[in-house]
Amino acid sequence: MHESTATQNEADVTKQALTPVDLRSDTVTKPTPAMRRAMAEAEVGDDVYGEDPTVNKLQARAAEIFQREAALFVPTGSMGNLVAIKTWTQPGQEVICETGAHINQYEFSSMSFVAGCLPRAVPAADGLLTWEMIEPLLQIKHPHKADTGLIELENTHNVAGGTVYRTEEVEDICEHAHAVGLRVHLDGARIFNAATYLKKSVAEITRKVDSIMFCLSKGLGAPVGSMLVGSHEFIQKAHRYRKAFGGGMRQVGVLAAAGLIAIQESPQGLASDHENARHLAEELGRLPGVRVDAAKVVTNIVRFDVSGTGRTAAEICGELKKRGILAGPFAKYAIRMVTHYDVNRAGIERALEAMREITRS
């Protein structure tokens, strides 16, 4: 090996060792070179006038992938969920959701503050509702109580650790809901992860829900944006609420271009993220004082309990950060790590070695 080549290889190894391994979320992914090229070359127009050709292409492609009539590009998943709730409900109604649902825990009570609805939350094992859990909560034309306006499901379920609904269960809920005149909205922020685990298309596993939000900026790796998909009528109404909530954008094709790459190329890499998450969970479970149910790690989220170490999650995350590993305390004694395409198996091994050092000390 030439001296210059050896020096370059050593420099690459040193750089890799110094680069933080960021497992806080799959939202930290950086746009790929293909996305950056597409963004630089994107043809743009004024999207408020409906004249951005790249946005229009992204919306058409998203609708096609989900086998729906139409789609709408929104700045964030939270806005997408809020727009859907506002589109389907009236002020004063209730939205049935699981207690740990993102719309209930992490969206600043926007369904109440903006849409005028109240969450009717019910806890469920692994965050997954069934019709038997939902039915007792229904209130339709009750003389004293607020009407049920919408049922919301989350797939995969973030707080529960990336758990996945069986398609049959989703369809059972939808069929019963439709029979009593209710709509079902799906927070599918990571729906491509669910489809990868189930080995089915996103269209197949969402065909009976009435609307779907999915994120471009999580495991799919785009820098910004989410999508709403549904019927023409739903999207036409949703478009007006997007504008009302400040989501009207101008030459936003520079972002939509990255979204197009994300939905066309990124899903193929999700299985690798899942494999890394399972490996991470299995090895974490071997550490003293750490508890994790590796069998439940089926997508890219790993939640584990560190109470047996005698340290809090925040303390351990602080020690991890000193070693170049970024993770998020999820509760006093719970840590969440999320795998994504910017962390390869070598990065996972670095995180595990850091955890081994911390639990030994």
Image: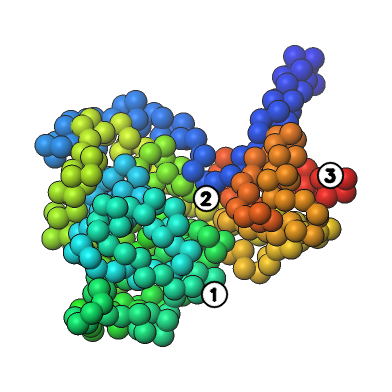
Going by the image, does 350 lie left or right of 237?
right
Q: Amino acid at mark 3?
A: Glu
Graded by Cα atoms within 10 Å as few (under 14), some (14 to 19) or many (20 or more), the crowding at tag 2 reads some
Choose mark 3 or mark 1, whichever is in front.
Answer: 1
What's the CA distance linking mark 2 and mark 1?
Answer: 29 Å
Q: Earlier in the sequence, mark 2 or mark 1?
A: 1
Q: Residues within 10 Å of mark 3 (few under 14, many from 20)?
A: few
Alpha carbon separation for disc pair 3 and 1: 33 Å
Of the pair 94 and 226, the residue shown nearer to us: 94
Residue, disc 1: 125
Write down the quadrant of residue 122 in the picture: bottom left
Q: Earlier in the sequence, mark 3 or mark 1?
A: 1
Query: How far is the residue under mark 2 from the one under mark 3?
Result: 30 Å
Classify mark 1: helix, strand or loop: helix
Query: Residue 54 appears at what percent x and percent y?
Result: 24, 37
Which quarter of the rendering shows the N terminus? top right
Q: Secondary structure at mark 2?
A: helix
Q: Name the residue rendered at 34%, 30% in the picture.
A: 39
Q: Residue furthest front?
A: 144
Determine which residue is flagged by label 3. 357
Q: Is residue 167 above or below residue 260?
A: below
Q: Which-is-in-front pick, marks 2 and 1?
A: 1
Do the residues bearing badges 2 and 1 touch, measured as CB atoms within 8 Å? Answer: no
| Total marks placed | 3
Of the image marks 2 and 3, the number of the one nearer the N terminus: 2
Residue 150: x and y in percent read 27, 69
Q: Are marks 2 and 3 in contact (CB under 8 Å)?
A: no
* 126 to the left or right of 50: right
Q: Residue 347 placed where, x, y %?
A: 68, 41
Of badges 2 and 3, nearer the viewer stands 3
> What amino acid is at disc 2?
Gly
Q: Which residue is mark 2?
A: 269
